[in-house]
Image (cartoon, rainbow, N blue to C red):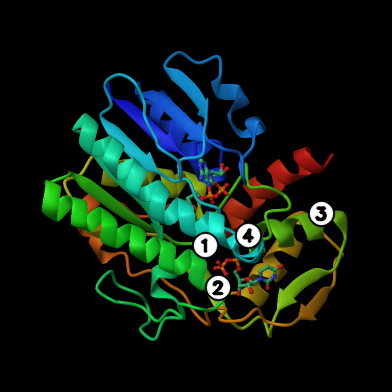
Amino acid sequence: MARVVVTGGAGFLGSHLCRALLDRGDQVVAIDNFITGSVGNVEALFGRSGFTFVEHDVSNYLWVPGHVDAVMHLASPASPVDFERIPIQILKVGGLGTHNGLGLAKAKGAKFFLASTSEVYGDPLVHPQPETYWGNVNPIGPRGVYDEAKRYAEAMTTAYHRVHGLDVRIVRIFNTYGPQMRPDDGRAVSNFLVQALRGEPITIFGSGEQTRSFTFVDDEIRGFLALLDSDVTTPVNIGNPAEYTIGQLAEMAIEVTGSTSELTYLPLPVDDPAQRQPDITKARELLGWAPTVELREGLERTAEYFRTVLS
Ligand code: NAD
Ligand code: UDP
């Protein structure tokens, strides 16, 4: 049994992670300032033994009393709509928040786990993307606030490993979806399913030929725990390599909801990556991890969640 601090614990992935840690007998201290998360995501955990919640902005000084075995740093807005809305908060939590989390882990002799992202590859010129690819990022574009914050966070985490011998893990997360996403989160999966359920037009940005590889949340969290429990201190891609165009995703959202929604085409956001697919050889070989939930099944399960939320 371990005592684990989860920053961003009231977010989409953070709340699933807190539940998975409690399920395996760990104690959890979740920390969140609710900038994009919600109490609703964690209210079912409040009664569970071993769960503590602290409302706090981790870009400010961070301290947790008592013994800590691991600090899992998930705090960060993650949707492209937030990149425009709260860019400075994103840079701060990726920079200062990561530094604070590293400082806490060092003081406690704990492991530090960083939630990084496929966005470190930017608009990739190598396809699929292995961890050895350095990426193609526009530092001053609208997505740069997120991509560069995460690249800085990886650099800072690796420096703590080299200089202080801190035991670190870095997961590069590819587009993950599932129950507990905010209906108004702004990402493709949530937008399309909510639009389809409401019978509204499905908003495709650009031609819809750009690709993404979507991972169901249960697979992603299983990957997090496999990495946490491993001894791999370098970045690992955790994502489902099944690649779809955004047009295909829209069609599937319509099918699984039985919707009559039509497609509408809007301008492509600046620097929107043209393609994305993880090379997961490293995760397969070092963690024995592979995804199990196919997109259609995952969308059905997510649509069921949104149906309940919307009604
Ligand atoms: P989310 O917005 O649902 O969760 C992020 C949580 O962090 C929210 O609860 C938010 O309130 C909290 N937070 C943000 N800034 C904070 C601060 N300064 N102090 C305390 N709490 C703060 O997003 P998510 O999809 O659950 O993403 C979780 C992590 O995974 C993020 O670090 C994100 O960059 C990373 N990630 C997610 C995806 C994905 O597809 N979901 C992909 C790549 C990386
Ligand atoms: N997208 C879209 N319509 C939407 C939301 C997103 O066509 O309503 C596109 C977006 O331009 C991108 C892809 O879907 O090409 C995935 O977007 P998302 O915001 O989910 O994640 P990210 O761009 O960060 O991978």
Specify few, some or many for label 2: CA neighbours under 10 Å numbering under 14, 14-19, or 20 or more: some
The mark found on residue 197 in the picture is 3
Q: Are marks 2 and 1 in contact (CB under 8 Å)?
A: yes
Q: Amino acid at mark 2?
A: Tyr
Up the image or down, 264 lies above or below 286; here it is below
Lower sequence index among marks 3 and 2? 3
Q: Nearer the viewer, mark 4 or mark 3?
A: 4
Q: Is residue 33 left or right of residue 117?
A: right
Residue that numbered label 2 is attached to: 244
Lower sequence index among marks 4 and 2? 4
Residue that numbered label 4 is attached to: 82
**For the point 39% across and 35% down, which residue is it?**
62
Q: Is residue 246 left or right of residue 3?
A: right
Lower sequence index among marks 2 and 1? 1
Up the image or down, 119 lies above or below 36; here it is below
Q: Amino acid at mark 1?
A: Phe
Lower sequence index among marks 4 and 1? 4
Give residue 66's quadrant in the image: top left
The mark found on residue 301 in the picture is none
Say what secondary structure mark 1 lies in: loop
**For the point 28% across and 24% down, which residue is it?**
2
Lower sequence index among marks 4 and 3? 4
Q: Are marks 1 and 3 in contact (CB under 8 Å)?
A: no
User: Which of the four quarters of the rendered structure image does ligand 2 lie in?
Assistant: bottom right
Residue labelled 2 has its Cβ within 8 Å of some atom of ligand 2: no
The mark found on residue 214 in the picture is 1
Give the Cα separation between the discs numbered 4 and 1. 20 Å
